């Protein structure tokens, strides 16, 4: 799923070329990919594959125990961060060593960058009260490819001060990301190409061009990473999390995962239920093995159409400010008029249709962007391109980070599960979907198409599931109209994790609600993390206030 700079509600700045992980099912999703060959031969091959996978998983389980014991003995030598001049003095950095391949824990090792802001012990509501420390709270912002290294700085914000009083806030860069054995699939200088097109209904020639690009990208990943490419997986991200837990000196893990972080967090809960203290799943990915990841991306594209409609309705209600149309249909016409102009003459030589679409895609994640994007579109159509260029033009300095995030996203999703290898399947499913959900469908295809031509082996998908009493109660947070992680994913995750509790923000669509503007949601979050207290099985909160329009000049 393609996007640009995303700022999660938890306060972690993600400069990434990709949106958070796809999730869930939604209306309008085409039928599942047809199954492969059937019969005795196929069943025998499946059986042999299952036995081999079991043996590999057993070796990897032993490898995690070895790595975790080693990490517990070493701990983490926290010190000044390498970019300390830009960081508040309270944040410290260190590394945790993990095996590249858990089946061979004595083999090649990689270092994961880890950060910490220690518990303040200061109650923001009562300066005389000393708050006892409850341990470490480890955070992941999603992706795959998102970097949580700067999450501990969220403790400086009012929404996180009570949690930061009781917990050491722990961020880290997952394997392949940032300073953690960074992965690359192409020259970053060639990654952010602009201006570029984004046809809603691509021609056969355009599709062939994107197929060629996808094949080249898949080859680039294999050539640059070599044999290491196969080890960037969600299962290894879950195993790395257990090694980080051990290195922090924690017997049991307290974890907050957002978006894709909920998926490998759920894998962790399945693999290591006795190692869990408390877990928060914010904007949950649908963990159904049949949907990882091809069908989840179809569902995400369908859901974005609904969120795009929400944005257009909001703009139409504020036509007195933006003059883009007083109905959603008229706003769409204004947007399409801008697309047509940019296709002929890109704004500032940098912003074409794809850059405009990407800017509005970001607004599908966070409604904080709505006033900015509406103002930029309004100004552009009235002859002032400057706001649009400022908001939509690629930032050259971010190219390396964006390419790295793209590489990790692609590697993890392609490695995690089988994908259709015949473009005719993609073409059929997405042509059908684009009839009802044109906004994001084909751009989502191009972001994921390298998986059709992937050159590393695929994982067998683990069935996320825990039985009664196996796992401590966990908290799931979800916005009802989240497009990046459709709401069905939260319902499915709750069904699969016995005893899980779901808190829903009704009639809202912000992706990532923990620590955001909804005080009701934050109240449940604090009650759980600080007191271990959970509400009934399912509760809901009223939506946070819609953004206020800004005056277009």
Image (cartoon, rainbow, N blue to C red):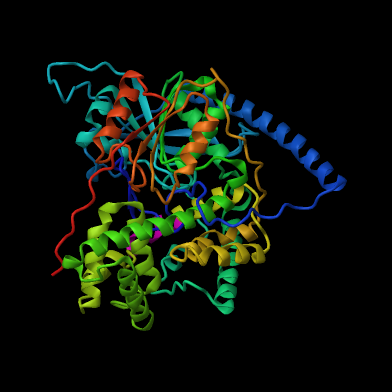
Residue at image coords 28%, 77%: 348
Q: Position of residue 258 (x, y in %)?
A: 40, 40
Quadrant of residue 524 in the image?
top left
**Is 397 part of what is drawn in magenta?**
yes
Instruction: State the residue lying farthest toward the bottom.
Output: 344
Q: Position of residue 164 (x, y in %)?
A: 26, 28
Q: Is residue 465 left or right of residue 82?
A: right
**Is 139 part of what is drawn in magenta?**
no
Q: Nearer the viewer, residue 513 or 501?
A: 501
Chief SS of the magenta region: helix
Magenta region, residue range: 396-404
Residue at image coords 47%, 47%: 144
**On screen, residue 355 above or below 407:** below
* Residue 146 visible to the viewer: yes
Residue at image coords 30%, 74%: 334
Instruction: State the residue lying farthest toward the front.
Output: 327
């Amino acid at each position: 799923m393609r996007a640009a700079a995303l700022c999660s509600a938890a306060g972690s700045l993600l400069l990434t070329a990709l949106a958070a992980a796809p999730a869930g099912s939604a209306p309008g999703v085409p039928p599942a990919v047809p199954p492969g060959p059937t019969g005795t031969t196929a069943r025998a091959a499946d059986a042999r594959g299952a036995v081999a996978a079991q043996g590999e998983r057993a070796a990897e389980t032993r490898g995690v125990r070895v790595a975790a014991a080693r990490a517990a003995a070493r701990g983490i030598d926290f010190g000044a961060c390498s970019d300390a001049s830009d960081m508040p003095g309270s944040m410290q950095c260190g590394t945790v060593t993990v095996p590249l391949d858990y089946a061979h824990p004595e083999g090649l090792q990689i270092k994961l960058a880890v950060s910490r802001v220690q518990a303040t012990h200061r109650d923001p509501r009562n300066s005389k009260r000393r708050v006892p420390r409850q341990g470490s709270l480890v955070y992941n912002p999603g992706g795959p490819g998102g970097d949580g290294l700067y999450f501990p700085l969220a403790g400086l914000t009012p929404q996180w001060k009570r949690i930061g009083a009781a917990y050491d806030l722990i961020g880290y860069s997952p394997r392949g990301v940032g300073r953690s054995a960074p992965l690359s699939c192409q020259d970053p200088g060639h990654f952010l190409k602009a201006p570029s097109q984004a046809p809603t209904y691509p021609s056969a020639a355009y599709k062939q061009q994107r197929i060629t690009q996808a094949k080249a990208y898949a080859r680039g990943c294999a050539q640059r990473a070599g044999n290491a490419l196969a080890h960037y997986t969600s299962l290894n991200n879950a195993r790395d999390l257990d090694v980080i837990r051990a290195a922090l000196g924690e017997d049991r893990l307290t974890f907050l995962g957002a978006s894709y972080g909920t998926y490998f967090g759920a894998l962790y809960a399945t693999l290591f239920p006795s190692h869990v203290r408390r877990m928060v799943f914010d904007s949950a990915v649908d963990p159904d093995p049949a949907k990882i990841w091809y069908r989840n991306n179809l569902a995400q594209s369908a859901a974005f159409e609904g969120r795009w409609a929400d944005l257009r309705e909001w703009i139409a209600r504020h036509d007195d400010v933006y003059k883009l149309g007083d109905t959603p249909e008229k706003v769409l016409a204004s947007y399409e008029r801008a697309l047509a102009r940019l296709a002929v003459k890109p704004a500032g030589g940098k912003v074409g249709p794809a850059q405009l679409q990407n800017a509005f895609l970001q607004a599908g994640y966070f409604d904080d962007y709505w006033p900015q994007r509406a103002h930029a579109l309004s100004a552009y159509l009235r002859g002032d391109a400057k706001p649009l260029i400022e908001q939509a033009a690629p930032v050259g300095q971010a190219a390396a980070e964006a390419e790295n995030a793209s590489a990790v996203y692609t590697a993890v999703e392609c490695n995690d599960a089988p994908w259709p290898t015949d473009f005719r399947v993609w073409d059929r499913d997405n042509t059908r979907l684009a009839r009802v959900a044109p906004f994001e469908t084909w751009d989502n295809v191009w972001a994921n198409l390298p998986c059709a031509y992937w050159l590393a082996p695929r994982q067998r998908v683990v069935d996320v599931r825990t039985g009664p009493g196996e796992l401590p109660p966990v908290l799931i947070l979800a916005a009802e109209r989240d497009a990046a992680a459709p709401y069905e994913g939260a319902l499915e995750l709750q069904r699969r994790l016995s005893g899980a509790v779901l808190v829903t923000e009704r009639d809202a669509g912000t992706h990532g609600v923990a620590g955001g503007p909804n005080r009701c949601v934050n109240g449940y979050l604090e009650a759980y993390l600080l007191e271990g207290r959970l509400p009934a099985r399912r509760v809901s909160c009223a939506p946070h206030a819609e953004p206020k329009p800004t005056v277009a000049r």
